[in-house]
Image (cartoon, grey):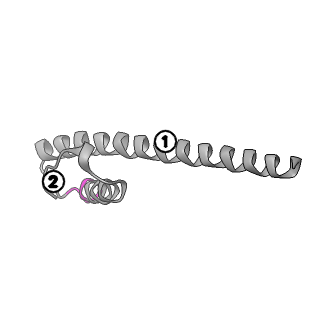
Amino acid sequence: MTQKAIESLSFETAMQELEQIVRQLEEGRVPLQEAVSAYSRGAALKTHCEGLLKIARTTIEEKEKKAIKILFEAREK
């Protein structure tokens, strides 16, 4: 995968690249210097994915709160 800016990657694309990096490192197919660079990119991809998951979790929690509020308001009527 090209060295795209991590911030522009979707969750799915970032996870796919991270999985590819992990496979390469586990198989030992990468020279040391490339492995160090791949590890650094992998760490950044992991952080990016965690941030996207946190945003998704917050969005879902907000929607759940709104739905619960609507249900309680409907019961009060």
Label 1's element? helix
Residue 15 sits in quarter: bottom left
Residue at x 53%, y 45% (from the top left corner): 59
Q: Position of residue 65 (x, y in %)?
A: 68, 43
Tag 2: residue type?
A: Val
The quarter of the picture where the N terminus appears is bottom left
- Which numbered dot is residue 30? 2
51 vs 25, left or right, is right
Q: Position of residue 14 (x, y in %)?
A: 30, 53
**In the foreground, 1 or 38:** 1
What segment is highlighted magenta in the picture?
Answer: 24-28
| Residue 76 position (above or below residue 17) | above
Residue at x 88%, y 47% (from the top left corner): 76
What residue does disc 1 label?
54
Label 2's element? loop
Tag 1: residue type?
A: Lys
Residue furthest right in the image: 76
**In the foreground, 37 or 70:** 70
Q: Position of residue 66 (x, y in %)?
A: 66, 45
Residue depth check, mark 2 versus mark 1: number of the one nearer the observer: 1
Label 2 crowding class (10 Å Cα cut-off): few <14, some 14-19, many 20+? some
**In the foreground, 58 or 70:** 70
